[in-house]
Image (cartoon, rainbow, N blue to C red):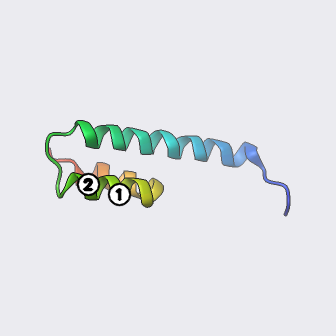
Amino acid sequence: MNEINWALIAPLLILQAILTFAALFSCVKQEETNGPKWMWILIIIFVNMLGAILYFLLGRKR
């Protein structure tokens, strides 16, 4: 239990980091969002992967 299998965890951490940065970049570049931008930035940062997915599904205006 003391050993961490980084071969399984590392790709998930990298995917989470890429998704988070992509969502933050998109949110900052977006002219208008569904709701205040500051709220979406906080959701993306503090809710981790689910926050970024929620932003891409619900936060962007089309």
- Quadrant in the picture for residue 35: bottom left
Name which residue lies at 46% across and 56% down: 48
How many numbered discs sit on the rendered protein?
Answer: 2
In the rendered image, which residue does mark 1 sit on? 42
Image coordinates of residue 36 in percent, x first then y, are 19, 56
Mark 2 element type: helix
Q: Which mark is residue 3?
A: none
Image coordinates of residue 52 in percent, x first then y, are 38, 51
Name the amino acid type tagged 1.
Answer: Leu
Q: Determine whether 60 is above or below 54 in the image.
A: above
Mark 1 element type: helix
Name the amino acid type tagged 2.
Answer: Trp
- Image quarter in which the N terminus is found: bottom right
Q: Residue 38 carries which label?
A: 2
Rate crowding at label 2 as few (under 14), some (14 to 19) or many (20 or more) other CA atoms within 10 Å. Answer: few
Task: Answer whether labels 2 and 1 touch (C-beta < 8 Å).
Answer: yes
**Distance in Å between CA atoms under marks 2 and 1:** 6 Å
Nearer to the camera, 58 or 26: 26
Nearer to the camera, 29 or 56: 29
Nearer to the camera, 62 or 36: 36
Q: Determine whether 54 is above or below 29 in the image.
A: below
Name which residue lies at 85% across and 60% down: 2
Rate crowding at label 1 as few (under 14), some (14 to 19) or many (20 or more) other CA atoms within 10 Å. Answer: few
Name which residue lies at 20% across and 39% down: 30
- Image quarter in which the C terminus is found: top left
